[in-house]
Amino acid sequence: MAKNSPPSKAPRRRLSWNDPGTRSLIYQVLILGIVGFGVWFLVSNTLHNLAVRNISTGFGFLNREAGFAIGESVIGYSPADTYGRAIWVGILNTLRVSIVGIIVATLLGTLLGVARLSKNWLVSRVAGAYVEVMRNIPLLLQLFFWYAIITEIMPGPRQALNPMPGVFISNRGLKLPTLQGDGLDWILGGLAVAIVAIVLLGHWGKKRQEATGKIFPLGRWAAGLIIVFPVAGWLLGGAPLALELPELKGFNFTGGLTLTPEFAALLAGLIIYTSAFVAEVVRSGIQAVSQGQWEAAAAIGLPRSRVLRLVILPQALRVIVPPMTSQYLNLTKNSSLAVAIGYPDIVSVVNTTLNQTGQAIEGILIIMAAYLTVSLSISVFMNWYNKRIALVER
């Protein structure tokens, strides 16, 4: 009976230039050393130059009094607050315009993308003209255009346009009715519960459709929940609630919700510009789905609108989501152009801060960190959603 031969030892790797593994390791060490030396040189040279010019460094200035006003803010702010709070106001202003812009641009761009594929000649041509014109005009010019429309062409407050009760459009911006009172917190709480319920109901409806083939009318249920839960929250809370209408007093309006000319122009420019690119992403995603899917769905009697919603768009999402992520990132970064029309975003606030404190390097680092954090957050969420809708191979 033959004995098992002992396992052979792996050959010892020789440190030779002819060995590809050795060469790749040496190259990586050299490149890492060069990059490290470059970083050390830049940092040490910058610190030396700052010390020679007696320029202080560090982020201690964030705790000092800012001393300048900010035109609009999501949270309370006064010139007596610190630079840190002023910068936080700028970040929230950037997030506000970015989130609203992403939502509206997605909806408008999806409608335009579907319209470009319409069999109606007029609808498809109008949508095509919109896309080709808007995405080929620089965004900065569009911001100047919309800002000029609002501030130069719109009438003053006394001659403000009043398209419906409580709504006024003037060169001071857009005035809208708003809700006031302690009951507003209960309404927002009910709205949050309604959104969670809609998500859970949609997940359950999808599982039900996969098991039984019956389509759950999520749209009607969602509309009902959006109304029922906030009203129920207000009734359960028992808190007072009043509708505040804007009123003209003197040379301007008081009360109500105000969309300033800067915010309105920036939002309009971002939405119109980005929606043109979103439309092309949606159109290409729909066209990537095989024509046989349309024919198979039509063969079983589904109307074209339901085929698009239930068959085509779910498959097209796998093509749409990756380039759509880039458009969301572009919209967020393009919001930095707000400084050109005076909207107090993070770039505008930090520019004022570094002009007063001289902390230019720290200010630039803050801007970079803010946009990097927001961009990475968007990328993480979109990558998670892309994996969630991806086809699972068996």
Image: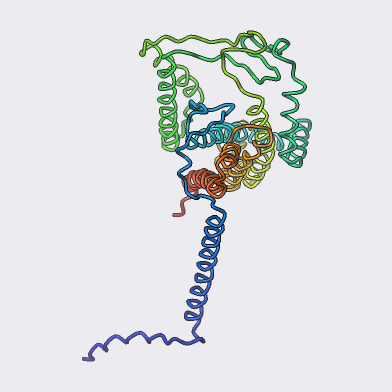
Q: Is residue 304 left or right of residue 39?
A: right
Is 346 in front, or is 146? Answer: 346
Give the answer, above or below, for where 18 lies relative to 177: below
Q: Percent from the top left, x then y, of residue 17?
A: 51, 86
Q: Percent from the top left, x then y, of residue 40?
A: 51, 64
Label count reads 0
Q: Percent from the top left, x then y, of residue 116?
A: 72, 37
Is 306 in front, or is 224? Answer: 224
Q: Where is the C terminus found, in terms of image quarters?
A: bottom left
Q: Is residue 156 left or right of residue 219?
A: right
Q: Is residue 195 left or right of residue 307?
A: left
Q: Quadrant of residue 205?
A: top left
Give the answer, above or below, for where 288 lies relative to 247: below
Answer yes or no: is residue 312 visible: no
Q: Percent from the top left, x then y, of residue 261?
A: 66, 25
For image coordinates 65% across by 13% down, the residue present is 252
Q: Is residue 310 left or right of residue 5?
A: right
